[in-house]
Image: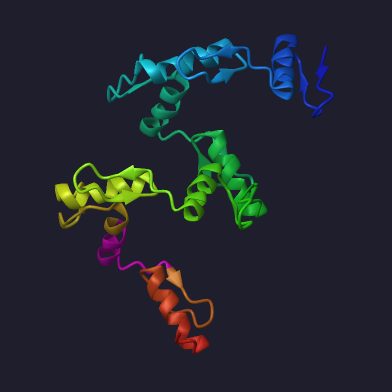
Amino acid sequence: MAYLCEECGKTFTSKSNFVTHEKIHRNERNYVCEICKKAFIQKHHLDAHHLIHTQEKPHVCVICTKAFSKKITLTYHYRVHTKERPYSCDVCGKAFSRRSILTVHYRIHTKERPYACDVCGSAFLRKSELNTHYLTHTKEKPHSCEVCGKEFSQKGNLNLHYLTHTKEKPHSCEVCGKEFSLKGNLNLHYLTHTKEKPHSCDVCGKAYSRKSYLNRHYLTHTKDKC
């Protein structure tokens, strides 16, 4: 027997799954965290949420001993070791370790941008990108450096900034041993060894190792020097 959701048309073979799904439409969240008051539809979601407050990480990788609060996160992590990518794009064939990543990837092909800014109308692939974009309007910089006090809108930029204090260069070239603070700079450096030029001009075919060099080259065709 199939159970049909009259709200969205989704069908279920399990009555319990159908009942749980209906709660999503009714926004019925009966399980509330007594610490932060965040509410959940299912009890096991609340139980998993509690681990954020307790900092407990009971799920440990037997390969590298890294620990996680959720079992599903450990499952995803194992694929880093196994290189398993069970979700593949039927448009371009690219494969991913998570279905959610594949879902976002599809938007590259469909040009779908479901997350739109209600201030300026700019649209994004991911909600996280929209949240980051909002900071350009609010000018908010919630992440501050504990060393010098400099503030940043994104945590990732703060982490990169810390390297200016520690002088740490965690990314080293396997060919010549040169070290870099940013992985992106290491990737660009590798091109000096491989002589690869992945960015080519679609006007004359000339190729460059960096996209910024290609953009500069395009000006020779457009004559737009400003």
Is the residue 103 above or below the residue 71 in the image? Answer: below
Camera-side residue of 115 and 4: 115
Q: Which residue sits at x=57%, y=18%?
A: 39
Percent x, y of residue 211: 41, 69
**Coloration of the structure image:** rainbow
**Left or right of 88, for residue 158:** left
Q: Which residue sits at x=68%, y=17%?
A: 28
Q: Main secondary structure of the magenta part?
A: helix
Segment tinted magenta in the rendering: 187-198
Percent x, y of residue 189: 26, 62
Quadrant, the C terminus: bottom left
**Left or right of 78, for residue 163:** left
**Left or right of 18, for residue 149:** left
Number of numbered discs on residues: 0
Is the residue 205 above or below the residue 20 in the image? Answer: below
Camera-side residue of 157 and 142: 142
Q: Which residue sits at x=19%, y=53%?
A: 164
Q: Can I make out residue 171 in this image?
A: no
**Left or right of 111, for residue 193:** left
